[in-house]
């Protein structure tokens, strides 16, 4: 029997109507994902959907010169692969595990059958697609208009929401890649946040010390994304 506390950690799975969830439970697989584990590679055909519990997944665009930037991050509020049934199942960008944690996966063939069988699942799929699109548009504007210190604070807040613990592992190199900036820039921002007592950073581990002040240090996009 699939452990019910695992799927309840993901907000999309928890939002499924009872009959739809009962239909999917025999096909759900619980797992612990490790940092840097590859979920999807660009160009491959998606065969499963992955619902994070307390892990964080990152969708990363790789440029021809090897540089990369995070174009989307997914935590317990979402899923990778949930909207694949809406069209071509070819994966656009690489998806990796950014932070260790629990997740639940299901073969897309069964998820798509649930979409066809239960109108409420189809409605949830479409609402999630709309939310992802709105989030992506906001993130593009944020990257263009807001400084690294504002964006870094927003990223840390979103990570804090998703992992639901004050201390989590993230290397400055990885955070720099996610934000599309130099490691030295991230080091300066984290150093200043630590100096004023908002976070504590040590050996790839960040602890949120003052959530309210971190929110004040973030750009307006954090609040806007929360309202989507």
Image (cartoon, rainbow, N blue to C red):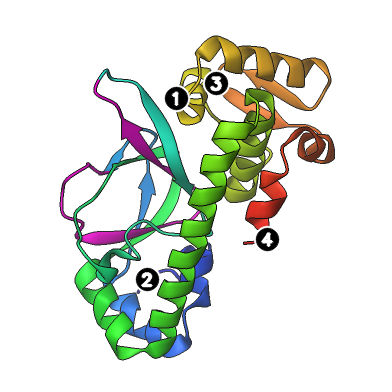
Q: Mark 4 points at which residue?
A: 227
What whole-number distance in Å separates the C-alpha atoms at marks 2 and 1? 35 Å
Residue drawn where x is 62% and y is 62% of the image: 228
The nearer-to-camera label among 2 and 1 is: 1
Q: Start and end of the magenta stretch?
A: 40-64
Determine crowd level at label 1: few under 14, some 14-19, many 20+ residues with C-alpha closer than 10 A.
some
Report whether residue 167 is seen. Answer: no
The answer to which of marks 3 and 2 sits earlier in the sequence is 2
The disc, 1 or 4, on the residue closer to the chain's N-terminal end is 1
- Please give the residue where the numbered disc 1 appears in the rendered image: 177
In the displayed structure, does residue 84 sit left or right of residue 88? Answer: right
Name the secondary structure under disc 2.
loop
Which quadrant of the view contains residue 27? bottom left
The residue singled out by tag 2 in the image is 2
Q: Which of marks 3 and 2 is in front?
A: 3
- Image vertical order of residue 130 relative to residue 16, above or below: above
Q: How crowded is mark 2: few (under 14 residues within 10 Å), some or many (20 or more)?
A: few
Q: State if disc 4 and disc 3 touch (CB < 8 Å).
A: no
């Amino acid at each position: 029997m699939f452990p019910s506390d695992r799927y309840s950690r993901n907000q999309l799975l928890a939002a499924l109507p009872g009959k739809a969830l009962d239909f999917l439970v025999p096909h759900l697989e619980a797992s612990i994902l490790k940092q840097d584990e590859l979920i999807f590679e660009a160009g491959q055909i998606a065969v499963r959907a992955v619902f994070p519990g307390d892990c964080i997944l990152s969708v990363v665009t790789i440029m021809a010169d090897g540089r990369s930037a995070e174009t989307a991050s997914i935590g317990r509020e979402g899923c990778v692969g949930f909207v694949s049934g809406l069209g071509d199942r070819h994966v656009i960008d690489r998806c990796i595990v950014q932070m260790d944690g629990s997740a639940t996966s299901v073969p897309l063939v069964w998820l798509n059958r649930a979409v066809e069988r239960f109108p409420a699942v189809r409605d949830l799929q479409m609402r999630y697609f709309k939310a992802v699109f709105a989030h992506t548009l906001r993130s593009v504007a944020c990257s263009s208009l807001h400084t690294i210190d504002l964006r870094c604070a927003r990223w840390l807040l979103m990570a804090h929401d998703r992992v639901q613990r004050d201390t989590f592992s993230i290397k400055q190199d990885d955070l720099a890649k996610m934000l599309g900036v130099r490691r030295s820039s991230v080091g300066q921002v984290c150093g200043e946040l630590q100096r004023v007592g908002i976070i504590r950073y040590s050996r790839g581990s960040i602890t949120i010390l003052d959530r309210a002040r971190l929110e004040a240090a973030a750009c307006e996009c954090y609040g806007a994304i929360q309202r989507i």
